[in-house]
Image: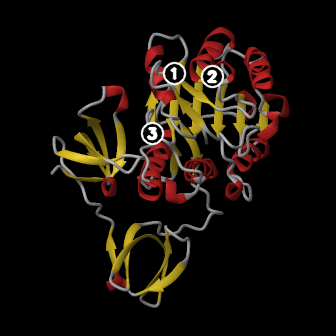
């Protein structure tokens, strides 16, 4: 049985795919159909979380006034043993001068960050108004690792936190649903998320699965941290017999002399059905056209050049390396510009 109880769970979810100032905050029209934020909320409703214990603000409903007004009132209703889940999907922002992170509400004014939903304020409101002792925060947006950065400042809190983010604190994020879909699959008991094959899906299983999926599909570094008594092995779901297991191996497939990322789906008559990551097409291929995914890697300490958004190459050094991603520090910039980048954006320093 899951370790979270519907009657003891409070969900505050914000999902935004369009903004008032769309020239500043571009919408995500391709993400509207089959939006996983909505599926996530419906999962909790169908699981028995009482209607009054769920707030879901979608798109234009998620104004600064609505969020900042409803959030503290919502928190104050919870009891001592209750679990709070806070979820956000949309645009995120980061002020490199102050280090402050934000979730961008629908009516955010690009000229004044005072009307942005700040990550610091989220924690402040929880500390001041929430009566329970466990909080799970989840974010699928740019700079969402700001949750991790902020919770590190709350280590002495009486509240125990768990945070899982789609990206590192200094990294942008993509507009796909890879992170939220990973969460949804974990909660539904999808066997592909059960990485150790023990028949249960824990918070750690989900976080690890999301980390692998985000690195492989989106080339982003998902982050995970718990504090206090929040158990990283909290059971989210038992593996469901109703979900047909698929292979789900991360591989590369040869096509006309080039190799492309793909995931295996099933095997039949000596061939393997694969899903290509780049264009989402499927193909039955012979096993000899498939090889394990082994991304090109630089070593810790390597002096490299990294391609910037302005298409210039900047000198940097590799601090960490994992699964095709590299945490780099730039030679001419302070540490708060450190970020995770994929191998294709790095080259040996000339």
Residue on which the image places disc 2 = 113
Between circles 2 and 1, the one closer to the viewer is 2
Q: CA distance from mark 1 to mark 3?
A: 14 Å
User: In this orientation, does residue 227 appear?
Assistant: no
Q: Earlier in the sequence, mark 3 or mark 2?
A: 2
Helix or strand or loop: what does disc 3 sit on?
A: loop
Q: How dense is the environment of label 3, judged by Cα within 10 Å: few (below 14), some, or many (20 and up)?
A: many
Where's residue 309, x and y in %?
Answer: 42, 47
Q: CA distance from mark 3 to mark 2?
A: 19 Å
Where's residue 131, x and y in %?
Answer: 68, 13
Q: Can you tell which mark lies on residue 171?
A: 3
Above or below, comparing residue 168 to residue 348 in the picture: above
Q: Earlier in the sequence, mark 2 or mark 1?
A: 1
| Residue at the limit of the structure toward the right, as seen here | 52
Front residue of 2/330: it is 330
Between circles 3 and 2, the one closer to the viewer is 2
Above or below, comparing residue 279 to residue 144 in the picture: below
Residue on which the image places disc 1 = 100
Q: How dense is the environment of label 1, judged by Cα within 10 Å: few (below 14), some, or many (20 and up)?
A: some
Q: Left or right: 231 with respect to 181?
A: left
Residue depicted at 62% across the width and 39% down the height: 91
Front residue of 73/349: it is 349
Residue depicted at 77% across the width and 20% down the height: 74
Say if mark 2 contacts mark 1, CB within 8 Å.
yes
Say if mark 1 contacts mark 3, CB within 8 Å.
no
Residue depicted at 21% across the width and 51% down the height: 298
Q: How dense is the environment of label 2, judged by Cα within 10 Å: few (below 14), some, or many (20 and up)?
A: some
Where's residue 29, x and y in %?
Answer: 71, 55
């Amino acid at each position: 049985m899951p370790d979270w109880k519907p009657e003891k769970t409070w969900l505050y979810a914000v999902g935004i795919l369009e903004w008032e100032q769309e020239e500043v905050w571009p919408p995500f029209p391709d993400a509207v159909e089959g939006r996983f934020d909505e599926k996530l909320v419906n999962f909790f409703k169908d699981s028995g979380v009482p209607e009054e214990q769920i707030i879901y603000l979608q798109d234009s409903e998620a104004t600064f006034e609505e969020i900042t007004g409803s959030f503290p009132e919502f928190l104050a209703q919870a009891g001592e043993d209750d679990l709070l889940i806070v979820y956000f999907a949309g645009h995120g922002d980061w002020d490199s001068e102050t280090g402050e992170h934000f979730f961008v509400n629908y009516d955010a004014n690009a000229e004044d960050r005072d009307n942005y939903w700040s990550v610091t304020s989220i924690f402040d409101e929880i500390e001041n108004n929430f009566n329970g002792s466990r909080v799970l925060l989840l974010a699928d947006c740019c700079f969402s690792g700001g949750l991790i950065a902020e919770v590190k400042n709350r280590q002495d809190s009486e509240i125990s936190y768990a945070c899982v983010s789609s990206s590192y604190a200094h990294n942008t994020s993509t507009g796909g649903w890879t992170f939220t879909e990973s969460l949804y699959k974990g909660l539904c008991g999808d066997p592909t998320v059960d990485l150790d094959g023990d028949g249960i899906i824990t918070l750690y299983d989900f976080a690890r699965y999301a980390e692998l999926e985000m690195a492989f599909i989106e080339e982003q570094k998902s982050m995970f941290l718990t504090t206090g008594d929040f158990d990283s092995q909290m059971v989210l779901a038992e593996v469901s017999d109703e979900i047909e297991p698929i292979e789900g191996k991360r591989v590369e497939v040869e096509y006309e002399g080039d190799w492309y990322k793909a995931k295996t789906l099933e095997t039949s008559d000596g061939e393997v059905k694969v899903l290509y990551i780049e264009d989402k097409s499927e193909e039955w291929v012979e096993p000899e056209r498939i090889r394990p995914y082994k991304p090109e890697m630089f070593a810790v300490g390597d002096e490299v050049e990294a391609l910037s958004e302005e298409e210039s190459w900047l000198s940097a050094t590799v601090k960490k390396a994992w699964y095709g991603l590299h945490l780099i520090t730039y030679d001419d910039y302070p540490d708060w510009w450190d970020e995770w980048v994929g191998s294709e954006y790095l080259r040996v320093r000339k």
